[in-house]
Amino acid sequence: MKSGKMVGLMSAKDSSPNGKKFRLSSGWFLLLAVLAMLYFSPEKVKAQDDMKVEAYDTLNIEKEPIPTTQAGEFSPGRGFDLYKSKWGSLNLSLYGLLRYTNQLPATQSFTDHLGRVRNIDTRHDIQWHRTFVWASGFFYTPKLRYTVSIWGLASTGQTLIFGNMHYQVNKALRLGAGIGPNLGIRSLQGPWPYFMATDRQMAEEALRPGFTGGFWITGEVLPRFSYWLFLGNNLSQLGVNNTQMTRDLTKSFSFWWMPTTGEFGPRGGYGDFEQHQKLATRFGVSFTHAREGRFNPTSEPNPVETQIRLSDGVYLFETGSLADGVTVRNAQYQIGAVDLGFKFKGFHLQTEFFRRRLSHFNTTGPIPESESEIIDNGVYVGASYSVIKKKLDLYGVYSTVIDQFDRNPWEVAGGLSYFPSGTRSWRINLHLIRVERSPAGSTFGYYIAGQSGTTVSIATDIML
C-alpha cells in the first residue's frame, strides 16, 4: 500500500481536490432533447414520413444496412418474420453460445494493492454459456419499433426478460427508452457479438460501465456524423432492483464520424468479413458520468453493485477495498474514451484509449490520501485479417491498464474464427490469452480477477 496520511469521510457532494464540483445535473440532457425536437420543425418531420426504416439485418450490408446506433446485446439479428401487416409486425431472432474455457495454472493466488493474499478460483468447464431470444417489430407505424429480450446465462443460472422501444422521427432523431448501454466505450454501442472472439478484451472489460434502464436520443445529425445521448438509472442494473437504487442518474454521450464510406459493416462489428473495397473508417469519442452506490447496507461486506473493480480486481464497494475495515458507500465514476477503426479488403485495425476516474468517496472511515482519487488508463489494439475470404479470420489483440497502484496488468491474445456457412451467423472460434494480473473478472467473459497465466477457449455461436 502506498504511504500517505489518512483523509476523513467524504460526502456525496464533496468537491474534487481542485475545488471544482464534478456533479452534473441531468438538466443538460433534457435541454438537449427539447432543442433537438424544436430544431426538427413539423415541415421537416412531414417530409420524412415516407422514409425507409432500416432493417435489423446482420447478414447483408449492401441490401439492408442495420443502424449502428442499436444497443448491441439488445438488438436482434435478421430472424424470422412470424407476422406482418400495415398495423404491426413480429419477428423472432435468437443467439446461442457454447464455450469450453480452461484457465491455467489451475491453482493461483494474487496479492492486492493493500498487500493481502487472495485465492483465485480458476475455471475449467464446458457451458451453454449465453442465450438470447428477441421478439421484435413495429406497432401502428414502422417508425415505432419494439424489442423484447429473453436473456439467460447458464454459468450463473440467471434468466431475465426486458426490452426497449424507439421512435424514428427522422434520420437525425430517434427517441428510445428501455434497457440500453452507458456509452463509455465503443463495444457497448452495437458491435456485439461481432467481436474478434466471443467476448471483450481485458482492459475494456475491467474499466467499462454496463447496461441499465434509461432514455436516449440518437441519430445522424450531419452526413456520416452521428450522436447518442443517454440518461440511465445506474452503471449496471443487473441484479439491482428499483428499491435498492438511489436517485442519482447516469449521463453519457458518444459521437462518431465515418468519413469515407459512411458505415462500418453490420452492427459496426470487428473484422472485415464484408471485404470493403474502399477504406472504411470510424473515429469516435465516448463519456459516462455516474454517482454510484453499493445498493445495500454497509453492515454487509459484499456489495450488490459489482460493476466497478479496482485495478487489482477488488470490488470498489466491498468492505476493505481502500482500507482495512472501511466500506465505500458512494463514489463518483467517470470514463472517457477515444476509438479509431479501419477496414480494407479483409483487414481490420481497431484501437481505443480510455481513462477512468474514481473520486468523491463517501466512506465509513478514513482512507489513505493517495487513494482519495484513483485514475486508471487503459488501451487495446486489435488487428484481424481474412485469410480465406468469408471463411477464416486470423486476429491478434494486446491490451493493458496503466494504473495508480503500479500493477500495470496486460494481456496478449489471438485466435482463429471459422465461418462454416460463409456468413457471420455461425462461427467456430479458437481463442488463446496470456494475461498478467488481470483487473477484470466476471462470469460473462474470459477473466478471473487477479489471474495470471494462460486461458484456452474453444467456442461456437450462432445468430439468426
Image (cartoon, rainbow, N blue to C red):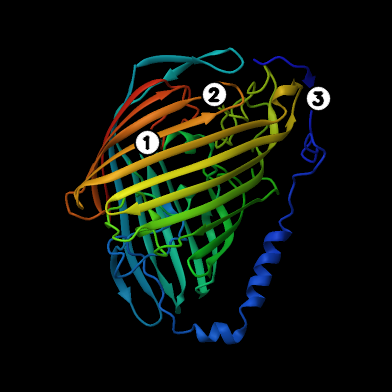
- CA–CA distance between discs 1 and 3? 42 Å
Q: In the image, is 39 to the left or to the right of 192?
A: right
Name the residue tied to disc 1. 397
Task: Specify the farthest residue to the right.
Answer: 19
- Mark earlier in primary sequence (1, 2): 2
Q: SS at mark 1?
A: strand
Pointers 1 and 2 in contact (C-beta within 8 Å): no
Q: SS at mark 3?
A: loop
Q: Where is residue 404 in the image (x, y as percent from the top left)?
A: 62, 26
Give me the residue at 72% from left, 28% from top.
372
Q: Which amino acid does label 3 sit on?
A: Gly
Residue 448 shows up from this direction? no
- CA–CA distance between discs 1 and 2? 21 Å
Classify 10 Å Cα crowding around label 1: few (below 14), some (14-19), many (20 and above): many
Name the residue tied to disc 2. 312
Classify 10 Å Cα crowding around label 3: few (below 14), some (14-19), many (20 and above): some
Q: Which mark is residue 384?
A: none
Q: SS at mark 2?
A: loop
* Quarter of the image with the C terminus in it: bottom left
Q: Nearer the viewer, mark 1 or mark 3?
A: 1
Q: In the image, is 131 to the left or to the right of 299?
A: left
| Tally of numbered tags | 3
Residue in the foreground of this view, choosing between 122 and 51: 51
Name the residue tied to disc 3. 8
- Mark earlier in primary sequence (1, 3): 3
Residue 328 shows up from this direction? yes
Q: In the image, is 26 to the left or to the right of 438?
A: right
